């Protein structure tokens, strides 16, 4: 079983937006590295499970009611994302630029 705690995933959506996810023991911190939301970030409790070898399903809820769901295939560096808020859903596909170890955040 793949462990996500202590990992970083950096990815780029097809539209050019770039994000970094840093996984702690109980939280994920996301940061927008480039694009329309560059400089924004947030830290939330998350859930993650390996749904197939090298395929992770990751999800968290934000304080504004938005739910982020991600399927990341770290073997072929592909990521699929959906953010849902009420009846509105946005889907993206992108490429994983980095999947590596990081310092563990204990929050």
Image (cartoon, rainbow, N blue to C red):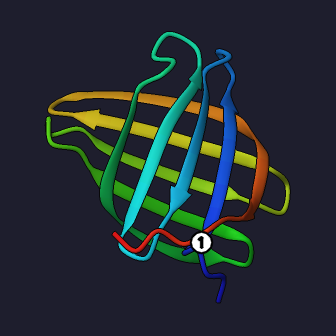
What kind of element bears circle 1? Answer: loop
Residue in the picture at 37% in, 45% down: 68
Residue in the picture at 66% in, 76% down: 52
Q: What residue would you read off at disc 1?
A: 6
Give coordinates of residue 35: x percent, y percent.
57, 13
Position of the N terminus, as image quadrant, is bottom right
* Horizontal side of residue 16 vs 24, given as left or right: right
Classify 10 Å Cα crowding around label 1: few (below 14), some (14-19), many (20 and above): some
Residue in the picture at 23% in, 38% down: 66
Give coordinates of residue 3: x percent, y percent.
61, 81
Judged from this view, the residue extending furthest toward the bottom is 1
Give coordinates of residue 8: x percent, y percent.
65, 57
Residue 86 falls in which quadrant of the image? top left
* Horizontal side of residue 83 vs 37, given as left or right: left
Residue in the picture at 68% in, 17% down: 16
Instruction: Choose between 66 and 22: the one closer to the eye.
Output: 22
């Amino acid at each position: 079983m793949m462990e996500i705690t202590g990992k970083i995933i950096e990815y780029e959506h097809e539209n050019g937006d770039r994000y970094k996810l840093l996984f702690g023991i109980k939280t994920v911190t996301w940061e927008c590295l480039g694009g329309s939301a560059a400089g924004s970030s947030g830290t939330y409790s998350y859930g993650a499970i390996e749904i197939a070898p090298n395929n992770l399903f990751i999800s968290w809820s934000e304080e504004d009611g938005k739910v982020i769901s991600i399927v990341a295939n770290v073997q072929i560096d592909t990521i699929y994302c959906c953010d849902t808020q009420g009846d509105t859903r946005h889907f993206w596909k992108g490429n994983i630029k980095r999947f590596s170890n990081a310092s563990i955040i204990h929050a």
